[in-house]
Amino acid sequence: MKHVLVLGGGFAGLESAIYLRRFGYQVTLVSNRDYLYLYPLSIWIPTGMTDFDRLCLPLGQLAAVHGFSLVVDRVVGIEAQRQQVELGATTLSYDYLVVAFGGDKVQHNGQEHFLSICGRPEESLALKQRLDALIAAGRGRIAVGFGGNPLDGTGVRGGPAFELLFNFDTFLRRRRLRDRFSLVFFASMPKPGIRLGEKAIGMVDQMLKHQGIEKRVGQKIRAFQADGIVFEDGSKLDSDLTMFIPAVTGKRLLKDSDLPLTEAGFVKINDHCQVAGFDNVFAVGDVARIEGPDWRAKQGHLAEVMARCAAYNIHAQEQGWEKRKGYEKHLSIMCVLDTGNGAAFVYRDDRRGAIVPMPIVGHWIKKAWGLYYKWSKLKRIPRIPGL
Ligand SMILES: Cc1cc2nc3c(=O)[nH]c(=O)nc-3n(C[C@H](O)[C@H](O)[C@H](O)COP(=O)(O)OP(=O)(O)OC[C@H]3O[C@@H](n4cnc5c(N)ncnc54)[C@H](O)[C@@H]3O)c2cc1C
């Protein structure tokens, strides 16, 4: 039985391991954490609407349910020509390799002065502590923003920034404290979120205005400081608590590997998720360069589609089948933008961009998705095809 090594225990890595096991391969999954973290739901941790532990799916349990081996260790190097992967404690070999360990973040001056909901999972808990301290102090100014990547815009993550802002707003209103706190949205691009289309972003603007959330956009960020953000034009945005989401960039450890990378450091793949120049290496999820229309974005659901394509294509190659599966035709943006008391459904494909308000029920749909994800991966409930 051929041995497939899957690197990464996020959406892409887990889905790859599950599908490769279904095809009957011996699978080893390597992750530097012993749990899969449900990033899309982490927006509720700072306001105490969910607990950290609820968002952690133990990989050991998933390994037992699906029959793959788990190694909890850090990948430090890949030598694809020699079919070897170096971990902190050992070196592993493989017949096929699936690289699925996500990306790194664009670096910023003074980055120690902000917390990110998209960074290490523990940062969400630090955000909660800082928010609680600010509430105890009785008043304050909270700045929430996201940044770009001039080399590759597919990993610019604005959705969770808007979600946190609206969740903070709802949280403060429920405690009748909203008038004591100012909320500010900031971004360096003149039209943040434009990939969703003019109509959708116009609606987000209206939502910000309606909730009394200030907006500072269009100025490049020079540096983050303990008490705010300094922009290129010398102006400063004062802040007692800054939450910022740097854009995703390529994984730095890959620079020393022999895998082909784009200028931004993402792994070059074809539509079948096969890495250029290697028959037996695939890359899926945030780690890979995705091709397609200008609005394309790295997302969890796309990471899963890519994982299923890679698993199928490995099997097809082994069986000598001609048919291959591609991810590009599945490109779309889908997101339930939660506000703490409702949500808006955001959708973008080649034909249209839409944002549909879903008061109250939208919030519960997002919660239900979290339960569905956990229980279906643990095989406690059947999977709905395509979800
Ligand atoms: C706050 C937030 C909200 C989001 N909301 C949505 C949403 O609503 N809808 C949507 O579709 N997408 C959403 N996304 C995007 C989505 O979460 C990502 O696209 C998705 O997680 C990418 O999956 P991945 O497996 O490729 O990478 P990751 O999720 O980054 O997983 C990478 C895995 O590799 C492991 N790893 C990293 N480095 C190493 C190493 N050196 N050695 C070993 N293991 C390593 C990590 O521990 C992790 O388990 C959101 C993201 C965030 C952060």
Image (cartoon, helix red, strand yellow):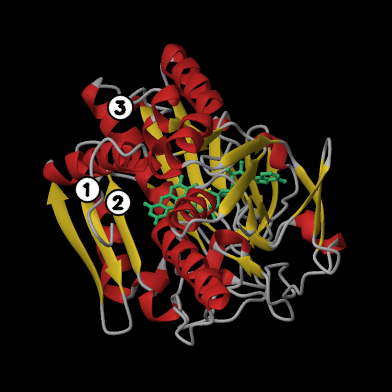
Percent of width and height locating residue 232: 69, 60
Beta carbon of the mark 3 residue lies under 8 A of ligand 1: no
Q: Position of residue 19 (x, y in %)?
A: 44, 57
In the image, what residue occupies the spot 27% across and 84% down? 351
Indicate whether 369 appears above or below 311.
above
Q: Which mark is residue 343?
A: 1
Dot 2 amino acid type: Leu
Specify few, some or many for label 2: CA neighbours under 10 Å numbering under 14, 14-19, or 20 or more.
many
Q: Earlier in the sequence, mark 2 or mark 3?
A: 3
Which picture quadrant has residue 335? bottom left
Mark linked to residue 172: 3
Residue nearest the viewer, comparing 181 with 67 = 67
Residue 45 in view: yes
Q: Which residue is mark 2?
A: 337
Q: Secondary structure at mark 3?
A: helix
* Crowd band around label 3 with a 10 angstrom C-alpha radius: few (<14), some (14–19), many (20+): some
Q: Residue visible at 87% across and 61% down? A: 256
Q: Residue at x 53, y 30 (%)?
A: 60
